[in-house]
Image: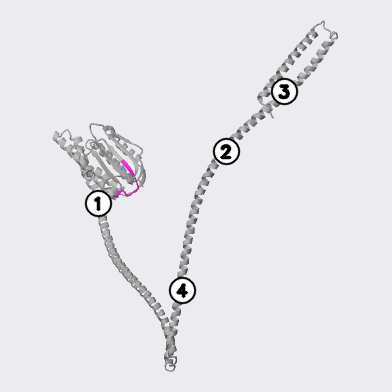
Amino acid sequence: MIPSLGTEKANEAEKNRKIKKLEKELSDAWSHIHSLAEDPAYDEKLMTAGERKQAAALMITNKKLLSQYEEKEKRAAELIIANKELAFQNKEKEKRASELAIANKELAFQNEEKEKRAAELIIANKELAFQNKEKENRAAELIVANKELAFQNKEKEKRASELTKANKELAFQNKEKEKRAAELIVANKELAFQNKEKEKRAAELIVANKELAFQNKEKEKRSSELTKANKELAFQNKEKEKRAAELIVANKELAFQNKEKEKRAAELNIANKELQSFTYISSHDLQEPLRKIRVFLTRILDEEKEALSMNGKNYLDKIHQAAERMQQLIRDILAFSQLNTAVREFKLTDLTAIVEQVIVEFKNILVEKNATIEYGELCKANIIPFQFHHLMHNLVDNAIKFSNPNKPLKISIKSRMVKASKIKIENMEERLTFKNYCHITFSDNGTGFDPQYKNRIFEVFQKIHDKTLFGGTGIGLAIVKKIVDNHQGLIVATGKLNKGATFDIYLPAE
C-alpha cells in the first residue's frame, strides 16, 4: 500500500529536522577543530584522548550524515515517482469513473429501450394471438363449409346415380313389356305372374315418373330463367343500338361544329389580316399626316408666333394639343390591337427588375411631381416580359396622370405568393384554374374613383373623370386588363374619390 501524501510530508519534515540538528552539531564541532588548528599554540599531539574520541565520533557521524543525506535524496526521488504514479492512478480512476457513469447512463437508456421494445412486443404478441384466433375461426368455418359442400356433392351424385338407374330400369321395363306383349298370345298362364311383375314395375315407374316430373319442372324453371335472360339481352341490345344512334348523331354534330370552327378560324384569319392592315395603316399612313401637322405647327409657333394674334396663338396651341392627343390615341389603339397578334413567349422573370426599369423611365417626371415609388423584393412569375413592362408603365403613368396636386404622389408596389383557394373574388372562382398565383398590389394616393365605376375603367375609351382636368385616351387601363387576360390572370380595382386607388393583380406562378 502506498502511504498518503500527508504522512510522507510529515515523515520528511521530521527527518529534515533531525538532519538539521546533526548538521548544527557537526558544524559546531568542526568550528571547534578549526579554531584549535588555527591556534599557533595548538599541537595535535597535545590533544587529549577525549578530543581524539570526539573527533573520531564526529567523522563517523559525518559519514552517517552523508549516507543519510544520500538516502534522503533517494527517498525523495522515490517519493516524487510514487506521487506521480499516484496522481496518474487518480486520473485513471477519474477517467474510469466518468466512463463508468457514461456506461451506466447508456445501460439505463438501453434498459428503457428494452422495456419499450418488450411492451411493444407484448402488444404485438397479443395482436398476433388475436389474429391467430381469428384465422382459426375462419379455418374452422371453412372446414365446415367444405364438409357441407362435399356432403351436397355426394347427395347430388347419389341422385344422379339413382336417376341413371331409374332410366335404365325404365328402358329395361319397356323392353320387357314388348316381350310380354309378344309372349301374351303364347303364355296366358304366365299372365298373372307378368301382371304382378307389371305392378311392381308400375310402382317403380311411378317413382321414376315423379322424379322425371321434378326434372321437367327444373327444366321449365331453367327455361323461364333463360327466357328472362334473353329478354334482358334483347333490351340491352336495343339500348346499345340507341346509344350507337345517339353517338352517330353526336359525331355528326361534332363534325358540324368542327366545320363551323374551321369557318370561324378562317374568318378569324381574315379578321387578323384586316387588323394587321389596320395596324400598318395606323402605324404609318395615319401617323405620317399627324407628324407633318405637328412639324408645321411647331414651325409656325417657332417662326410666326410674334405675327399671330392671341386668338391665333390659342387656336394653334389647341390644334397642337389635339394633334398630340390624336397621335397618342393612335399609339394606344395600335398597342391594344398588337396584344392579340404578338407572339406570347412566357419566361420566369424577376418582377423587381422590370419595376426598376419603369422607375428609370419616369425618373424626371417623378422628380418634377415630387413623387415616390415604394417597392420591396417582388416575387418571380412566368410572364411575357415586354407585356408586363407595358402593364407597369401604364399603371405608373395612370397614377401620375390622376395624382392629387395638393399633396405629393406616393405609389406602393408589393407582391406575395398565394394559393388559389385563398383568393376570394366575387364571380371569379371559375377563372382560378392554377394552384398558386403571384398577387401584385399597386396602390396610390391620387384622386381615386367612384366605386361604381370599378369595372367600367377597364373598358376601351371610357373616361370617368373631367376631360378638361385630366388628359388621356381612355385606353391605358384597357391595355392593362388585356395584358392580364393574356397571362390568364385577374385584375380588380378598388378606390374612393380623393382617397387613392388600388389595383390587385393575380398572375399564375407556374
Q: Which residue is mark 2?
A: 104
Q: Is residue 372 left or right of residue 325?
A: right
Q: Secondary structure at mark 4?
A: helix
Gap between marks 3 and 4, in whole Å?
A: 118 Å
Residue range in magenta is: 430-440
Q: Mark 3, mark 4: which one is toward the viewer?
A: 4
Q: Secondary structure at mark 3?
A: helix
Tell me, for residue 476, which label it has, or none. Answer: none
Q: Are marks 4 and 2 in contact (CB under 8 Å)?
A: no
- Rendered residue at 44%/87% (across/down): 176
Q: Amino acid at mark 3?
A: Glu
Tell me, for residue 275, which label it has, or none. Answer: 1
Q: Which residue is mark 4?
A: 157
Q: Secondary structure at mark 2?
A: helix
Q: Secondary structure at mark 1?
A: helix
Q: Is residue 427 above or below residue 172?
A: above
Residue 507 falls in image quadrant: top left
Looking at the image, which is closer to me, 318 or 409?
409
The quarter of the image holding the N terminus is: top right
Gap between marks 4 and 2, in whole Å?
A: 76 Å
Q: Is residue 176 above or below residue 219?
A: below
Q: Residues within 10 Å of mark 1 (few under 14, many from 20)?
A: some
> x and y percent of residue 301 in the render?
19, 36
In terms of sequence position, does the residue under pointer 4 or pointer 2 come before the other?
A: 2
Q: Which residue is mark 3?
A: 73
